[in-house]
Image (tube, rainbow, N blue to C red):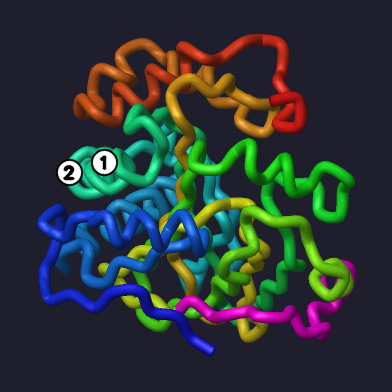
Amino acid sequence: ATVSRRDSSAHGPSVPITHVDLEFYQNEGYLIVREAFTPNRISALAAAVERIMDRAIAGEVEIGWIDRAQRAIGRTGHLLNPDLYDPAFAEWLDQDLAPHLHHLVAGGKVRHSLFNMLAGGAGQEYKQRWHRDLGRAGGDDEGAFLQRHHGKLVQFNAPLQPGDHYLQIVPNSHLRASTAAELEAAADKSGATGMPGALIVMLEPGDIVYYNANLWHRGWNPTGRKRWTMHAAFWTADYPVMKHEHGQRAALLTAGHMDRMPPITRQYVQRYLDQYTDDAVEIFDL
């Protein structure tokens, strides 16, 4: 099955997050906004990716290649770090994403967590197991853990290539303990066991899906189609930086780097730095 939350003829930051949207997101754990970004914005982001690949070919930066001849790359992380930073990413965050994040993260004060791109292609299959990003599926306190973090974080996928149908989710699975059938499907390394209630998120460039990272979900690209999907996560500003978020501070503090960021992106990154401690905090301790 496919999912669609909203169809809109509006573009860019004029597409607001409404109270109805927010209620849907909180209850179902995801929200699709159609045509949220202009074609010019998508072109600018794709051009930024092309520039990163050009720099990698020139030996200036390192990225994970799948096939250089076909300009196919794998998942690429830390796009706000100075080696991979491009103004197009931060302009998008400041101008288009921030108004949405303000509503989707509890309290409206947002901090950076990760800013990546999910990528693949050149016929190389990608099959991810069903998972929750942060919750211990099947644990005795699973339901309580999920409830405790409700509203504190948001992730998104926003494609730069057409026909993006790689994300699969189980709506309304983010606030409850896992069922036996869900645990069985997740345990199947082949991915062949059906996941009850699973839906395929169908996106086109300009669309975005915001989702709770603790939904049951997976990435599924068995034929290795070309994929460029912007992927980022944000937390409430008062959450400590956790172990899985470590490894960014030194790069972000490179002299002069944050000075070139626009104000909202710089604020989100500064809040990450403000919450950073050398002692790694485990998500399960919060």
Task: Decide: is 271 above or below 100.
Answer: above
Residue 143 in the image: x percent, y percent?
74, 48
* In the image: residue 149, left or right of residue 132: left
Residue 142 in the image: x percent, y percent?
78, 47
Contact between marks 1 and 2 (CB within 8 A): the answer is yes
Residue 133 in the image: x percent, y percent?
68, 50
Task: Decide: is 196 above or below 112.
Answer: below
Residue 117 in the image: x percent, y percent?
47, 54
Q: Quadrant of the C terminus?
A: top right
Residue that numbered label 2 is attached to: 95
Residue 190 part of the magenta-drawn span = yes
Circle 2 SS class: helix
Quadrant of the image occupied by residue 82: top left
Circle 1 SS class: helix
Q: Quadrant of the N terminus?
A: bottom right
Residue neighbourhood size for the residue with mark 2, other residues' Cα within 10 Å, grouped as few (<14), some (14–19), many (≥20) = some
* In the image: residue 226, left or right of residue 129: left
Asked whether 279 or 52 is in front, the reply is: 279
Task: Decide: is 280 above or below 8.
Answer: above
Q: Which residue does the image show at 51% across and 37% down from the upper left?
A: 152
Q: Which residue does the image show at 87% across and 48% down from the upper left?
A: 139
Can I make out residue 61 in this image?
A: no
Quadrant of the image occupied by residue 101: top left
| Magenta residues, dominant SS class | loop
Task: Decide: is 80 above or below 246.
Answer: below
Span highlighted in magenta in the image: 185-201
Per the rendering, the mark at residue 98 is 1
